[in-house]
Image (spheres, helix red, strand yellow):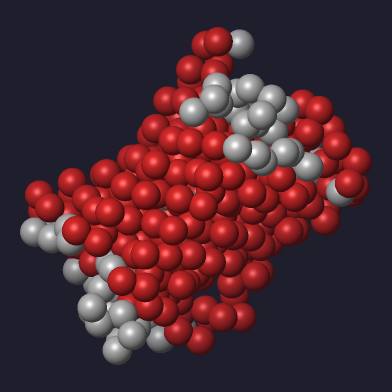
Amino acid sequence: MARQNLRAHISMLAATLLFGANYWIAKGLMPNHLQPMQIIFLRVLGTMIIAWAIQLSVKELRGLRIDRADYPRLVVSSLLGVSINQMMFFTGLFYTTPVDAAIINSANPILVLVFASFILHERIAGARLGGILLGAAGALMLILLGNPLSFKGGHLAGDMFILVNTAAWSLYLVISKPLMVKYNPFLMMRWMFLIGFAGVFPFTIRQALQINYHTFDSYTWFAILYIIVGTTFLAYFFITYSLKRLSSPVVAYYTYIQPIIVAVIGIAVFTEKISWIKALSALLVFAGIYFVTRKKADSSSGTLNAKSIKKSKTNA
């Protein structure tokens, strides 16, 4: 069990590193190479094809099925974790900066705890409630004050899209947890990305048909492959694998590493400047995370324990 948990933590660290680099790689594609909806179409379609190819080519995976009783949870999880998550993230990243997006996304552990309290009836009190308020204050400060042009351009809209993206991903981590415990990761990815692709198709197909592949240079192909294979297929697999062994809040805690990765890449490679408002916003979010998570991550007060998961299955 301890070795499996260690593998799950290593998987989450790998997923976090992949996601951290993705902010800059995806931002580099827009708008000169591809539009947000074009990237979403290619990302979800490519990952769906890989997941189905693996599922159908491996004999041990072919006969796996999902119980009909779990269909509603599967559909909701897929729309939240793939469709809404992808559309909000790339649309938001188109307008805002990678650093701002990463700081807002770092509120993920706090939102997971909030959603868990409503869905799984986990109690929030004392320091945890204070941590949630601190994290919310940090996110709001960044959105409202983080850029002097926020109200003149699309920066504010971009931050709001990222906030919706963060909320959708947090809710996905809570709702999908029972499925991840019950089913094989490849089986879950196969159906999640099929349903997720159906969700993004109406919004992306028009721009997808306008993609001119003949104009792609080496960076464009590299970025697309990285986004499909690295930050979608591998990262989602790592997260799905980890959710089978770790609680949703523990998985969410790794999100707070992303702003550090994004900031280091931004300063070292892209000469990104970190303003005092962004630094203070990040400090408030991290302080909130500290108070929310300072008890043992896998204790009954901060996790989706077996009792809670059982309760959620009953309510599904």
Q: Residue at x 37, y 65 (%)?
A: 141
What is the total number of numbered labels drawn onto the structure image?
A: 0
Q: Is residue 65 left or right of residue 39?
A: right
Q: Residue at x 52, y 11 (%)?
A: 3
Residue 122 seen anywhere in this rendered image of the structure: yes
Rendered location of residue 119, percent (x, y): 77, 48
Is 163 situated above or below 293? below
Residue 54 seen anywhere in this rendered image of the structure: no
Viewer-closest of 126 and 314: 126
Rendered location of residue 18, percent (x, y): 35, 44
Q: Quadrant of residue 162?
A: bottom left
Is 83 situated above or below 212? above
Q: Quadrant of residue 31?
A: bottom left
Rendered location of residue 303, percent (x, y): 65, 31
Q: Residue at x 26, y 44 (%)?
A: 261
* Residue farthest along the top direction in this orientation: 2
Rendered location of residue 268, percent (x, y): 10, 49
Is 205 situated above or below 110? below
Q: Is residue 192 left or right of residue 156?
A: right
Q: Residue at x 39, y 32 (%)?
A: 13
Quadrant where the N terminus lies? top right
* Residue farthest along the bottom direction in this orientation: 152
Viewer-closest of 236 and 299: 299
Viewer-closest of 315 and 49: 315
